[in-house]
Image (spheres, helix red, strand yellow):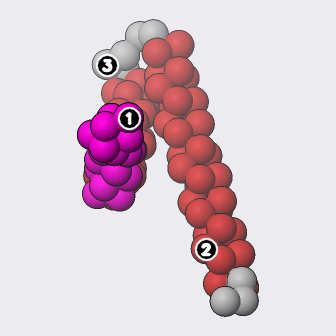
Amino acid sequence: MPVNAVSAPLRPAQAVHQASAAGFGELLSKAIESVNQQEWEAQRLSLALAAGEVDDIHTVTIAVRKAELALDLTLAVRNKVIDAYQEIMRMQV
């Protein structure tokens, strides 16, 4: 078997590893920005409803609930990351 055939499958894995290491921060940043955007949209719709500019309360309720769920998911992920970090710090080398 040629050397290139053996090493070829490793290149995509190495590329994925390098991309995921650099991309995780970017992915996390985009996710937090998305949660922030949903929070702003829910607040905007709530204020518009209070001002009488929005007649459909269902749209406002759905936007607020989406923002709540996104924030809850973000907090759950953050808590899991902190737990994993603490577990790693307790490991003996």
- Residue 65 location (% of width, % of height): 57, 30
Residue at position x 65%, y 84% from top? 89
35 left or right of 53 in image: right
Q: CA distance from mark 3 to mark 2?
A: 46 Å
Find disc 2 in the rendering and name its residue.
85
Was residue 88 drawn as part of the magenta stretch in this picture?
Answer: no
Q: Earlier in the sequence, mark 1 or mark 3?
A: 1
Marks 1 and 3 in Cβ contact (< 8 Å):
no
On the image, numbered disc 1 is attached to which residue? 1
Residue topped by disc 3: 53
Asked whether residue 20 is in view, the answer is: no
**Label 2 crowd (10 A; few <14 / some 14-19 / many >=20):** few
Mark 3, other Cα within 10 Å: few <14 / some 14–19 / many ≥20: few
Viewer-side label of 1, 2: 1
Q: CA distance from mark 1 to mark 3?
A: 71 Å
Magenta part of the protein: which range? Answer: 1-23
Q: Secondary structure at mark 1?
A: loop
Q: Position of residue 9 (x, y in %)?
A: 38, 37
- Total labels drawn: 3
Q: Residue furthest bottom?
A: 93
